[in-house]
Image: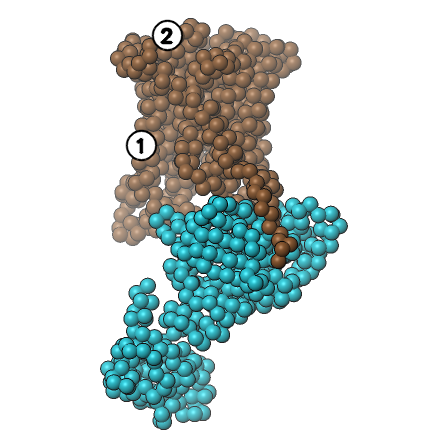
Chain colours: A brown, B cyan
Amino acid sequence: MSTSSIKTKSSIGVGQIILFLSVAILVIVVAFPVLLILFNAFWVEGHFNLKNVIEVLSEPDTFKALKNSLIIATGTTIGSTIVGTFFAWLVTRTDLPHKTFMKSMFLVPFMLPSFIGAMAWKMLLSPNAGFINQFFIHHLGFTGPVFNIYSYLGISTVEVMYLFPFVFIQVCGALERMDPTLEESARISGAGLLTITRKITIPLVLPSIMSGALLIMLYSMAHFGTVAVLGIENGIYNIPTLIYERIHQSGGSFASIRTGTVLATVLVISAAIIIWAQRTILGKGHYQIIGGKSFRPMELKLRGLRMPLMIFCLAYIAFTIVLPTVVIFLVGGLKTYGLSFTPENLSLDNYKFILFEYQVTRDAIFNSVTLGFSAAIITMFAGVMISYVIVKMKVRGKGILEFLGMLPFSVPGSVIALGVILAWSGKFGINLYNTVWIILLAYIARYMAFSLKANSAALEQVHDSLVEAARSCGATMWQSLKDIVIPLVRPGMLAAFFLIFLPSLRELTVSIMLYAPTTRTIGVAIYTLNEDGETVISAALAGIALIIIIVGQTIINHFTKKEGA
Amino acid sequence: MDIIRVEGVAKAYGDHQVHEDLTLAIKKGECFTLLGPSGCGKTVLLRMIAGFESPDAGKIYIDDTLVSDADDSHQEIPPENRGLGVVFQDYAVWPHMTVFDNVAYPLKIAKRPKDEIKKKVMDMIDIVGMHGLEKRLPSELSGGQQQRVALARALVGNPSLMLLDEPLSNLDANLREEMRFEIKELQRKLDVTVLYVTHDQEIGLAISDRVAIMNEHGKIQQIGTPWEIFEKPVNPFVFSFMGIANFMAVRREGADYVVGTGNQVVPWEKPVGEDRQWSAGFRPSDVKLSRSGEGLKGVVKRANFLGAMMDYLIEIDGEHLRTSIETHRALTQDLMFKAGETCVVSFLNLLWFRAEELQEVVKE
């Protein structure tokens, strides 16, 4: 037969193009800046120099910052682990009333920006002007402040309030998935409930507790916002705040950048150690007894403690979530900071002012929304492409792609910001310093991991045969991507978009290192206005930010519930 | 003439050599089944023909066009340009498109005029018996209906060759039986060559013009009509793959062939060859049981009443065999044996294999 339907013309290697683009994006956006940090830290005047690194680290200021980071992170980790485990146990394993409500409330701090919380606590508990301290001094006859929030304890406590959900979620999951027969068989063997908890339950969920705790350690070591708001006043710096302070004060001098890179290297190394520890714990096979199935676990009767514990939980929620939020909105409504909360002192004027009149805040809102939107769109599409290479393509070395994509997930924001400064301030021909583009690049690097996770999960659902079927129907690689793959991963892309858009609206750590007078973001504006003493304006802007975040989160929840149904 | 020619193809995944020097030809217009146990590499071969995998060595021709050449020109024609219809085990019906859009896709890609697409798609939907369901989404269809959509989609572009990869294994038994005849009908009606890959010998025998049997190592053992494969298997592997197989050890003593450890001489057709140790292969349906007469004397070791059937385990001089007989026939013909009774066994058909050949199969 001569009238063959086979076309001997072959199409260009779409696979190679996708692979090349993916590698290019990750190398330019992630690998290059991070490598520059390591290079600058260890490479002085043209040769490798470890002595200089030690010198920088043993300067009194840097050494103190290292110590502070460690003290705060340790305190925060211990506190969060206790709080998170206790509440997780309460809502999964006891007959506490209104458990579902409590569980969702304990997750609220996840979406609240901790630096806004820190601002609220500063208003409540600063030694002299804090509302609570003043109340105790003026009305209860105290001679001094009851609690000084400008302290290690104060900083750690505030961080615990916002970070404990990391442990809470992990432990809840483990307790819910644990096979109850493990406990029941211990009970049949004659063990009391206390013995079971000590000998069976806790050892079984220990990996989850540890993994959540390490996540908090990682986060707290590199945490900027809370320490910046509460620590600097009393001279408490940790690594990220010191990097910021040095670079900010010197306007990016060589010495400050060097100190920055050395400190950033310390952060990267400690992050690597923490992640290695977490992998080892999770990889030991402890998890095998915890299956994917959902069981109905044994519930402990709280009896006489039922009501007191419920009141305790409600009080905790009121004190740590409701109170700070209310304070932010109230202060945002005050005419001048320091006036009392009476109806004649409160109005919506500040809110109107920042939304419609004040150029700084209007710019900040505009910048954050456009930056967040652009970063989310770009990262969403880049994420689909890179995930496609990682999940679907059979190429060697894609493990490196995965590593590079996930790297920013564990590399602290201040490190990314510093890397971006090193890479894009003109040293290599392109100078983006003091423009929005440098912030955009940093956002893309920082949020790539979110996009990869959401898109990889969606792509894994798209079976290879769906694409092969399209190919056998005559579609080229491009056509099958466009007609089959993209429509099917759209939910994952949408999830990625929101997972990036929302956090970027409240982003502080990266933006604070990169902003110029005209490129402030919402987070930067709140922080700098607060530093400049514009407390009421800053609180009003924080209130607006909270509203945007809560509305956005509600939309996401709505979407994800629909997808699940 | 041959529509597919596979010449000296090799394929390995890491250290695992799936195919080595594989050669196969499929004639135009036939329904050809590639039959083999799971994991033998039959799907890999189909995927190489479709263009989803590239061979490490060898050449593949479709319609006399070289589509894969790993030896000389290293040319690979991508799957979309091979002009095939492919049906997958998991249907691979696109969940975000309606039945109509699924079936119309190959024509849309080929940029055919709208009304031609509409007519052809509706015709094809009728042919596969999905009339009236064209606006449904795949999630609103049963497994069998989804597979019909996949068939329609593979056939709508009027390909000269259709590849089917275990298309029925996700369906339940009744539907499977129904669908296999429909596939055969479609093949005849549309005059398309079919390459069907399966591990299910029943389907292979039912619909094929020719069958190729592949062993675990990807080696083709025998190619022939279903009847040839069933009646004249070339080796114990093919024989046991085509249904329940019994083997009985037989030894040569001079010109006689003696069963097991005893001294009963096999009175039927003798093997050809000089070997001393032989195996006589037979299917349960080839066994004839009686109380007396010509045959081999045996002892009933166990008798099981299974309702419609009587199941017996019989020993002949150290060799065990199982057979069953319809209960009502056993009753009317006095063939209800009890354990310990003697019986006479004769065979309607014996296939002779050398004992070492059988050893190889058992080892694997």
Along the viewing direction, whichever of A55 and A332 lies nearer the viewer = A55
Against A314, residue B101 (above or below) is below
Q: In this rendering, would A451 be left or right of B113?
A: left
Q: Secondary structure at mark 1?
A: helix
Residue that sits furthest to the bottom in the current view: B293
Total marks drawn?
Answer: 2
What residue does disc 1 label? A277
Chain to which mark 2 belongs = A
Residue that sits furthest to the right in the current view: B115
Q: In this rendering, would A407 be left or right of B137?
A: left
The x, y position of residue B112, in whole percent, is 71, 48
Give the amino acid type for the residue marked by disc 1 in the picture: Ala
Q: In this rendering, would A368 be left or right of A47?
A: right
Numbered tag placed on residue A255 in the rendering: 2
The x, y position of residue B21, in whole percent, is 41, 56
Q: Callout 1: 10 Å neighbours few (<14), some, many (20+)? A: some
For residue A490, which quarter of the picture?
A: top right
Closer to us: mark 2 or mark 1?
A: 2
The x, y position of residue A199, in whole percent, is 27, 42
Residue drawn at (41%, 53%) of the image: B10
Along the viewing direction, whichever of A101 and B19 lies nearer the viewer = B19
From where the camera sits, is residue A4 visible?
Answer: yes
Give the amino acid type for the residue marked by disc 2 in the picture: Ala
Q: Quadrant of the C terminus of chain B?
A: bottom left
From where the camera sits, is residue B310 visible?
Answer: no
Residue drawn at (48%, 21%) of the image: A442
